[in-house]
Image: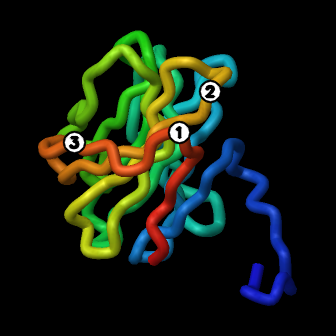
């Protein structure tokens, strides 16, 4: 749709959520595969040429494309609990960035593509803590305790 909400069109070939546009006009999103388990996929704007970027038995959600368009941060449960992962825009070089016994959610890139913020929760009855780290997973620092979700404004 246009920014004003006009000319809405459903992309019927795609099923999932959390869409983001790439610099070249494609869509990265969490797609429904494997009996409704979520994977990260990329497709043309018209829903053609769907490419599954992740492929395992775990749920993978909330892809966030780096502002420079080169990488995707996402959350995955492939190691038992949700952790933050990083991969190249083509799905290569998938790397786990966080390693702990809490669920780490909703990665968001800094405007210069150098850092990622995310929420971490151990007890779901309490608020989440917000952390920031370098895009390689180093220099992890809690920046907001007892908060919610954080997203960089771009």
Q: Which quarter of the image is occupied by the N terminus?
A: bottom right
x%, y% of residue 27?
53, 62
Residue with the most extreme top position: 80
x%, y% of residue 20?
54, 63
Q: Which secondary structure, mark 3?
A: loop
Q: Residues under labels 3 and 2: Cα distance?
A: 21 Å
Coloring scheme used: rainbow
- Is label 3 in contact with label 1 (beta carbons under 8 Å)? no
Residue with the most extreme front position: 145
Residue 140: which disc?
3
Front-most of residues 106 and 139: 139
Mark whose residue sits in front, 3 or 1: 1
Q: Which secondary structure, mark 2?
A: loop
Residue 126: which disc?
2
Q: Earlier in the sequence, mark 3 or mark 2?
A: 2
Q: Residue at x 40, y 33 (%)?
A: 54
- Is label 3 in contact with label 2 (beta carbons under 8 Å)? no
**93 versus 9 height, above or below:** above
x%, y% of residue 56?
41, 20
| Residue for badge 1 | 146
Q: Tell me if I can see residue 52 in this picture.
A: no
Q: Residue at x 55, y 45 (%)?
A: 147
x%, y% of residue 69?
32, 69
- Is label 2 in contact with label 1 (beta carbons under 8 Å)? yes
């Amino acid at each position: 749709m246009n920014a004003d909400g006009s000319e809405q069109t459903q992309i019927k070939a795609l099923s999932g959520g959390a869409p983001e546009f790439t610099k070249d006009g494609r869509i990265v999103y969490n797609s429904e595969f494997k009996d409704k388990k979520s994977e990260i996929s990329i497709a043309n704007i018209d829903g053609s040429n769907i490419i599954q970027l992740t492929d395992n038995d775990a749920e993978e959600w909330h892809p966030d494309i780096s502002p420079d368009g080169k990488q995707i941060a996402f959350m995955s449960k492939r190691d038992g609990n949700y952790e933050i992962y990083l991969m190249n825009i083509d799905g290569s070089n998938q790397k786990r960035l966080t390693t702990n016994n809490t669920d780490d959610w909703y990665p968001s890139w800094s405007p210069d593509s150098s850092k990622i913020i995310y929420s971490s929760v151990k007890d779901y009855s309490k608020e989440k803590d917000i952390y920031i780290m370098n895009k390689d997973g180093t220099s992890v620092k809690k920046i907001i305790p007892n908060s919610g979700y954080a997203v960089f404004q771009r």
